[in-house]
Image (cartoon, rainbow, N blue to C red):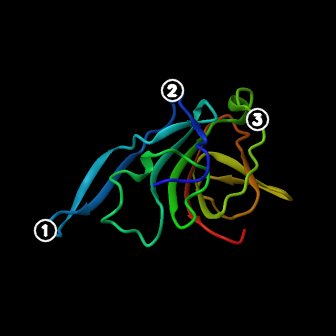
Amino acid sequence: MSSTQPDMTQQVPIADTVVRYRRIVTGNAADGKSVILSDEICQNIKAIMGVGTFATTELWKVDETPVNFTKEADDPAAESVSVAPPLNGNVFRIVEYPPDREWQKSASFDVMTHATPSIDYAFVIEGEIYAIVDKGETLMKSGDVLIQRGTSHAWSNRSDKPCRVLFAMIGAIGS
């Protein structure tokens, strides 16, 4: 699997406060019966912008759909992390956003406005975060869902606690 976008992560220690997620992966045995292939804490956790409390856990990634299970890697999310999914594929990830004040001082840039060629389903697992677009913003809280349709956007955690957001990102054209 490869992506044409640069890796958004840096090799720094992940803070102990960042949640580790259990990932269970199924498959089929040689006899065609379904089995649990792995059941463990997902190891694909990386710091974003060199900040140990600003992290992404890459749960799964595919280069194209439909997925060909006979050619899929054992852990396709173990590769480098890019903001957008592959054009014909998808990414399933959790991002832990620390309060803005914790990362903005140490980051190489303070504005994270971006657009990805994808449709993104963002579900706030815990905490609160502002979804910011060119002409407005809205506060999202635990249980809220945003359908991000390839538009320019940014995220801002103005609270004093981390915010955890689950993303299902599917490659798209025409944004």
Query: Which quadrant holds the C terminus?
Result: bottom right
Secondary element under disc 3, as helix, strand or loop, is: loop
Q: At 71% across and 72% down in the image, what residue appears? A: 174
Expressed as whole percent of the image width and height from the top left, the position of residue 36 reads: 24, 56
Q: At 68% across and 34% down in the image, what residue appears? A: 160
Q: Are marks 3 and 2 in contact (CB under 8 Å)?
A: no
Label whose residue precedes the other's in the sequence (1 or 2): 2
Query: Which quadrant holds the N terminus?
Result: bottom left
Tag on residue 31? 1
* C-alpha distance separating marks 1 and 3: 53 Å
Q: Are marks 1 and 3 in contact (CB under 8 Å)?
A: no
Q: At 25% across and 54% down in the image, what residue appears? A: 37
Q: Above or below — where is 55 with respect to 37?
A: above
Tag on residue 159? none
Tag on residue 13? 2
Location of mark 3 (residue): 109
* C-alpha distance separating marks 1 and 2: 42 Å
Which quarter of the figure has residue 42?
Answer: top left
Q: Is residue 170 visible?
A: yes
Secondary element under disc 2, as helix, strand or loop, is: loop
Label whose residue precedes the other's in the sequence (3 or 2): 2
Which quarter of the figure has residue 97?
Answer: top right
Q: Above or below — where is 37 with respect to 106?
A: below
Q: Amino acid at mark 2?
A: Pro
Label whose residue precedes the other's in the sequence (1 or 3): 1
